[in-house]
Amino acid sequence: MNKPPYDITSSILDLYGKINERLGQCKGLMLVRPEAQLRRENRIKTIQSSLAIEGNTLEIEQVTAILNNQRVLAPAKDILEVQNANLAYELLPTLKSHSIDDFLRTHRALLKGLVEEAGKYRSNDVGIVKGTEVKHVAPGSHMVPSLMNNIFDYLRKDNDPPVIKSCVFHYEMEFIHPFQDGNGRMGRFWQTKILMEENRIFEFLPIEAAVKEKQKEYYQALADSDSQGKSTQFIEYMLGRILEVLDGVLSASATKGADYGKRVEFALAQLDGWFDRKTYLEVCKNVSTATASRDLRQMIKDNIVEVSGSGRMTRYRKI
């Protein structure tokens, strides 16, 4: 096995540490498996976002209608992509991240009826063109099987943390470009598979939606890693998106229904140094101003925070 090249930077260490901290908070708040409605909403976001990155024109409402077996007026190809993606994501719990057979089976599900070589490595050489410029020339088709075997060996045998492995695999797969079509959605899908074997909550997190929100940076991170000959930049980018999604889940959990202790634990994990009530409200979304004020008064009584100033100038800091 030739280990894919990348550097451990201070940014990677910081992001990885924060991700582990957030996963611990999710476990403490019993968010390992979100409620059914939230799981469905996140799955729809995931499918719509991943396909939109590849040029699918359907919006969230249309994807929702298709998955509800309702009639939608849209290009047949776009509808089939959604139907295929839903079937592929239904396979997630049955797949093994280190199995090439499962990897090819997933591609077959995603691309069935869309390309001739669904479920098979490409048989021709390819390059990625943006506008009139060739951005990436993929390795020759004769090299694809051995290169893919190598990165699956990396998944099976290397001691890198799975969160890091998922980013490395995603980048290396995109570089190899093993399929005639569907490489982007396969890279994002398989990263989710690797992550969910580390923590089941990743099955239900819309990481693809975070990527779509910063799609330009996604392609730039791929290009930067290509030019540097290592996946460092891409790892930093993807860890940032994973952290954003985890922060979103935790923030959404700090609702009116959450108790004081959970809100405070979550908020103080996010807030460094001095903060005011407005900042507390930005972290604990969906709580009222009155609830925030009560929380802060209780934190003072519980000797959790110290106070500076008064009135509108009141500031708080964790003791």
Image (cartoon, rainbow, N blue to C red):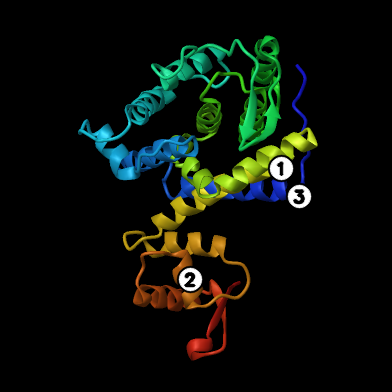
Type of amino acid under label 2? Tyr
The tag on residue 280 is: 2
Q: Nearer the viewer's eye, disc 3 or disc 1?
A: 1
C-alpha separation, residue under disc 2 versus residue under disc 1: 32 Å
Residue name at image x 78 percent, y 38 percent: 7
Of residues 59 and 208, the one drawn nearer to the viewer in this rendering:
59
User: Could you classify mark 2 by the number of other residues whose Cα lies within 10 Å: few (under 14), some (14-19), or many (20 or more)?
Assistant: many
Residue under label 1 = 233
- Residue type at numbered disc 3: Ser
Measured from the top left, where is residue 52 in percent x and y?
A: 44, 39
Q: Residue at x 33, y 31 (%)?
A: 75
**Which element carries disc 2, helix, strand or loop?**
helix
Q: Is residue 76 visible?
A: yes
Q: Secondary structure at mark 3?
A: helix
> Which quarter of the figure has residue 268?
bottom right
**Which labelled disc corresponds to residue 10?**
3
